[in-house]
Image (cartoon, rainbow, N blue to C red):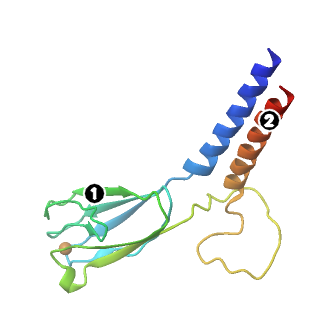
Amino acid sequence: MKNRLTILAGVTGVLLGLFLVGTAWAATTTVSLTVDNKFVPGSPTIEVGDTVTFTWDGGFHDVVFADGVSSGTPVGDVGTTFSRTFEATGTYPYVCTVHEALGMTGTITVLVAAGGGGAGGGGGGGGQQLPFTGPEDGILPIAGAALVVAGSLVLLRLRRAG
Ligand SMILES: [Cu+2]
């Protein structure tokens, strides 16, 4: 059946597009909990879908986010890790409850996924300043979005034709 094949193509396009938009370029950032009671780096900027792994390099610490997510009881074992994946944009303040008064605090800033940069050479442009991302970022998510649209159009046309 020709129609069935077209439906398959449309669905595949939509799914592939969603995949590109949603899950590409998940990265992991490491934050060290140091023996001198600091988070290093304390306030990294990441993208949606990225993971931050806290690593105990020395000292007796915990990681407690303002929204309640936490590493649990403070521990002093070097090599302990605690990871959190961020699925929404925003700022996520956190502290070590043991050393909060000493300034052992930080904030994770989660931005919209901008993509990994690539071969594309984009348009030229305005005097926009992008401190964290290069001008080529975002091409793959756009390609993903285009696939979603294209796949949807195929399905829509099928429905109209049928
Ligand atoms: Cu601490």
Question: Residue beneath label 1, please?
Answer: 82
Q: Residue at x 76, y 34 (%)?
A: 155
Sequence order check, earlier mark of 2 and 1: 1
Q: Disc 2 or disc 1, which is closer to the eye?
A: 2
Q: Quadrant of residue 9?
A: top right
Q: How many marks?
A: 2
Quarter of the render that holds ligand 1 = bottom left
Q: Residues within 10 Å of mark 2 (few under 14, many from 20)?
A: some
Where residue 161 appears, x then y in whole percent?
Answer: 86, 29
Q: Residue at x 30, y 71 (%)?
A: 66
Q: Quadrant of residue 98?
A: bottom left
Question: Residue beneath label 2, please?
Answer: 154
Under circle 1, the secondary element is strand
The one of 9 and 153 positioned closer to us in this rendering: 153
Where residue 85 appears, x then y in whole percent?
Answer: 40, 56
Locate the N terminus by quadrant.
Answer: top right
Residue, far top: 1
Q: Quadrant of residue 51?
A: bottom left
Label 2 – label 1 distance at C-alpha: 44 Å
Please say if 103 is above or below 89.
below
Residue, far right: 161
Q: What amino acid is found at the position of numbered circle 1 in the picture?
A: Phe
Where residue 69 appears, x then y in whole percent?
Answer: 28, 61
Where residue 75 appears, x then y in whole percent?
Answer: 13, 62
Please say if 127 is above or below 136.
below
Q: Residue at x 76, y 83 (%)?
A: 127
